[in-house]
Image (spheres, grey):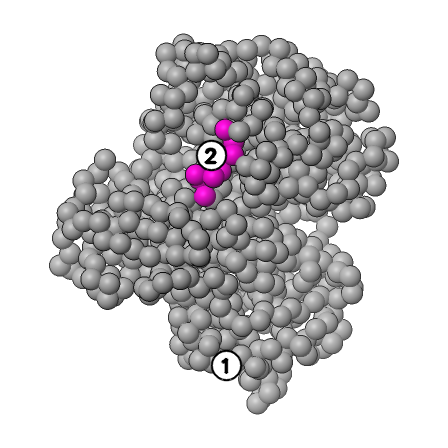
């Protein structure tokens, strides 16, 4: 990159590795600004321990679930954010109207601290006021009984425990709806839809042991240093062992290039680091399918010329659809592949050569694969590539979708889905004695559309920041303001809570770090990580307020008040979470001896038939798929169209902003930036530091984001990137993957208009 750029406030390019002393310093700052310095060490040391709590950050599993401490900067931030000493008191809320709070930046709203009392919106004063739990539950029940079940939406955050999520889906289905918009709809729904068609189950097939035995890792569309930080320890081990790690990503990400492990005395003492990626390919946004087809094309050609490249025995015994897949790949030309991927044929052939040499390959992927118009088809292409060489169901190999929240996968396992299976519904009826609804419910986008159309009248949110996480904020925000009732269960205030309807309630809940005492005594909850391990989590901190209740207790309280003739004894279930787990065991396969097995450190792994080469598909075999063409739908309208990727900063977890910095990308104290390839800037007559307006280049779209500062960056030509959730405004509500319903946050056609050549200071 050029050394002669003008200076832009807050932009200071970062030259060091990921991790290292910078990570330790960032953790120290988080502790100092959020927690009691005397409580912090003991709290952090209980993270991911057998008698401690599961980290509320990413879903990467623990290398050892015993008395070791694996340092993770962003996990520490998540813990300190929850265990903060800051409080949002009734006195503060009485002095600040909802309208005043709305004018604050998101970072400041969430930065106010922990909620302390159950709250109800008072329209006359435009304030949030304390309300008793019983009064609030009674009023919610009264409103819900006056609505048709299909008029109620039940949103779930991925941080909800298995116990809370199971009770939540049970409540909604006894009420009579399958309306379950949830955070998975916005991230890995393409995995949940695509993988069952390919291998029979919507989960990854690898374990940490497989990473110990793999010979090659292909990493596609994710930034683990920020989004799955515990994964960096695994990648660090692989790199030091000499295992090739081939990366496909539009942006050059520091953590995928060089990482200094804070656990390594040598690296910390010598200020050295380990190279992570053995090869780094900057695929253009939306070009993943073309790249995957190019790799497959060369593999097929290699097999045709020298033989013994494909696993023909595996393909014959365990798969169907290979001939059609191979014919489509053969018909796809290299010119289209190069143009679609932004990569050259020799580059993709080199990946295929490395893959052909490896006896055990893992492919990891994130939302850079799923959040596209053809996200489901992208996922299936990855499965196809693995099936070609029998890389599912053998040691050291498999598919590894990287989930975000630490229990987003568990929520799905215990029933949070808008399209439940008949087998699951039959089990619910047998165990609980009521007939659950069978008609498909709403996903996250469909729920917003139902609110806009006036079909949905109530929204209950078990955690999360639903409206801000959604695309097309102008429409989504308007949708929530039309509601008769909104209910939010949360630890902190966020912008979605301020989109008040006719009646709004905000319920403060316990966090993962806090002691949960019910009638039977202290309780544990359970979570499932991204490798299908289920284990217990027990908080130890004194709750932030005596008025807090646990998520299971809040769900049970609302259900008990809403369903006076319920078949479920809600209050007895929540008195002892072992009783909830007993019902989960009775309802769901794989949870045998649930209570006994979660008392074993590390927990247990749920059944994954594809790891045994058993395929629960309709055909009983793993299925190859067809991806027609190589490009995304909706290439954009007009001239000079670029493809926008939304991304998170390093001081961010989903919609939560811990600070306004993005250390590894060299951005400090601001978020109003657009990362852009410097050659693209020159072609458009722009330069580093220019201020532009961004508009969505789709037919009929009016979305725009104004006064954004250009930052020259190592990003694929034709691709630009801006921060989520601010850039969500540029994603139309109906711009999504038709198969999964996931919004296309990672491939929005946009155009830029120069606003000013003047340097904008930090706000």
Residue 206 placement: quadrant = bottom right
Residues in magenta, as a range: 472-481
Residue 593 placement: quadrant = top right
Residue 455 placement: quadrant = top right
In the image, residue 711 above or below residue 538: below
Task: Return the disc, 1 or 2, that comes first in the chain's sequence.
Answer: 1
* Place of residue 338 in the rendered image (x, y in percent of width and height, measured from the top left): 43, 75
Dot 1: element: loop
In the image, residue 59 above or below residue 206: above
Q: Which of 450 and 577 is in front in this view?
A: 450
* Place of residue 273 in the rendered image (x, y in percent of width and height, measured from the top left): 33, 55
* Place of residue 458 in the rendered image (x, y in percent of width and height, measured from the top left): 61, 28
Q: Nearer the viewer, residue 457 or 36?
A: 457
Point out the image quarter for the N terminus.
bottom left
Q: How crowded is mark 1: few (under 14 residues within 10 Å), some or many (20 or more)?
A: some
Q: Which of 238 and 617 is in front in this view?
A: 617
In the image, residue 616 above or below residue 49: below
Identify the main secondary structure in magenta. Answer: helix
Q: In this view, does 677 lie to the left or right of 690?
A: right
Q: Is residue 252 left or right of residue 711?
A: right
Q: Which residue is drawn at 76% across and 30% down?
A: 174
Point out the image quarter for the C terminus.
top left
Q: Residue at label 1?
A: 333
The answer to whether residue 400 is seen in the rendering is no
Q: In this view, does 106 lie to the left or right of 558?
A: left
Which of discs 1 and 2 lies nearer the camera? The answer is: 2
* Place of residue 129 in the rendered image (x, y in percent of width and height, measured from the top left): 48, 12
Q: What number is the disc on residue 699?
A: none
Q: Residue at label 2?
A: 477
Indicate whether residue 496 is drawn in magenta.
no
Find the distance from the CA under tag 1 to the CA under tag 2: 44 Å
């Amino acid at each position: 990159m050029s050394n002669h750029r003008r200076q832009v406030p807050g932009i200071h390019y970062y030259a060091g590795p990921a991790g290292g002393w910078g990570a330790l310093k960032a953790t120290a700052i988080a502790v100092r600004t959020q927690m009691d310095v005397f409580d912090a060490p003991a709290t952090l040391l209980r993270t991911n321990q057998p008698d401690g709590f599961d980290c509320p950050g990413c879903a990467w599993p623990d290398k050892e679930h015993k008395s070791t401490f694996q340092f993770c900067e962003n996990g520490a931030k998540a813990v300190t954010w929850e265990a903060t000493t800051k409080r949002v008191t009734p006195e503060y809320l009485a002095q600040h109207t909802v309208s005043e709070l709305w004018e604050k930046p998101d970072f400041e709203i969430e930065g106010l601290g922990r909620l302390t009392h159950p709250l109800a919106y008072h329209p006359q004063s435009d304030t949030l006021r304390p309300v008793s739990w019983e009064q609030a539950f009674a009023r919610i029940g009264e409103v819900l009984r006056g609505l048709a079940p299909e008029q109620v939406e039940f949103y779930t955050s991925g941080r909800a425990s298995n116990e809370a999520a199971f009770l939540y889906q049970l409540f909604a289905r006894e009420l009579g709806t399958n309306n379950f918009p949830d955070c998975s709809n916005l991230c890995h729904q393409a995995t949940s839809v695509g993988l069952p068609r390919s291998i029979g189950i919507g989960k990854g097939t690898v374990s940490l042991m497989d990473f110990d035995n793999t010979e090659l890792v292909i990493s596609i569309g994710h930034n683990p240093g920020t989004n799955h930080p515990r994964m960096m320890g695994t990648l660090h081990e692989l790199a030091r062992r000499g295992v090739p790690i081939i990366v496909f990503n539009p942006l050059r990400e520091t953590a995928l290039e060089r990482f200094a492990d804070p656990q390594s005395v040598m690296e910390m003492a010598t200020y050295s680091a380990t190279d992570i990626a053995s090869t780094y390919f900057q695929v253009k946004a939306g070009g993943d399918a073309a790249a995957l087809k190019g790799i497959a094309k060369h593999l097929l050609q290699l097999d045709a010329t020298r033989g013994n490249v494909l696993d023909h025995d595996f393909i014959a015994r365990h798969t169907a659809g290979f001939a059609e897949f191979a014919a489509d790949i053969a018909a796809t030309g290299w010119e289209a592949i190069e143009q679609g991927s932004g990569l050259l044929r020799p580059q993709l052939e080199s990946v295929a050569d490395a893959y052909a040499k490896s006896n055990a390959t893992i492919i990891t992927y994130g939302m850079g694969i799923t959040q596209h118009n053809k996200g489901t088809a992208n996922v299936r292409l990855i499965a196809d590539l693995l099936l070609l060489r029998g890389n599912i169901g053998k040691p050291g190999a498999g598919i590894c979708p990287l989930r975000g929240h630490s229990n987003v996968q568990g929520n799905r396992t215990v029933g949070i889905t808008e399209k439940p299976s008949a087998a699951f519904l039959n089990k619910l009826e047998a165990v609980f004695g009521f007939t659950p609804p069978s008609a498909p419910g709403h996903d996250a986008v469909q729920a917003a559309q139902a609110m806009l159309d006036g079909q949905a009248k109530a929204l209950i949110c078990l955690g999360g920041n639903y409206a801000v996480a959604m695309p097309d904020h102008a429409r989504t925000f308007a949708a929530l303001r039309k509601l008769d009732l909104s209910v939010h269960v949360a630890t902190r205030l966020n912008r979605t809570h301020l989109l008040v309807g006719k009646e709004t309630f905000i319920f403060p809940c316990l966090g993962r770090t806090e002691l949960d005492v019910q009638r039977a005594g202290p309780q544990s909850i359970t979570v499932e990580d991204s490798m299908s391990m289920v284990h217990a989590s027990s908080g130890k901190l004194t709750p932030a307020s005596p008025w807090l209740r646990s998520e299971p207790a809040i769900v049970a309280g609302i259900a008990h008040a809403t369903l006076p003739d319920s078949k479920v004894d809600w209050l007895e279930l929540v008195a002892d979470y072992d009783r909830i787990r007993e019902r989960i065991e009775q309802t769901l396969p794989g949870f045998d001896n649930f209570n006994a097995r979660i008392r074993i450190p590390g927990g247990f792994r749920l059944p994954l038939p594809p790891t045994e080469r058993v395929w629960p598909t309709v055909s009983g075999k793993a299925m190859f798929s067809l991806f027609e063409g190589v490009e995304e739908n909706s290439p954009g309208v007009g001239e000079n169209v670029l493809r926008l990727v939304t991304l998170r900063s390093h001081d961010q977890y989903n919609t939560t902003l811990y600070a306004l910095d993005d250390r590894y990308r060299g951005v400090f104290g601001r978020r109003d930036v657009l990362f852009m390839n410097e050659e693209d800037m020159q072609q458009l007559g722009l330069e580093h530091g220019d201020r532009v307006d961004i508009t969505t280049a789709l037919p009929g779209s009016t979305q725009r984001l104004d006064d954004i500062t250009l930052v020259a960056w190592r990003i694929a030509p034709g691709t630009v990137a801006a921060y989520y959730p601010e850039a969500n405004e540029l994603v139309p509500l109906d711009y999504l993957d038709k198969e999964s319903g996931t919004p296309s946050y990672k491939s929005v056609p946009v155009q830029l208009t120069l606003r000013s050549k003047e340097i904008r200071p930090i706000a």
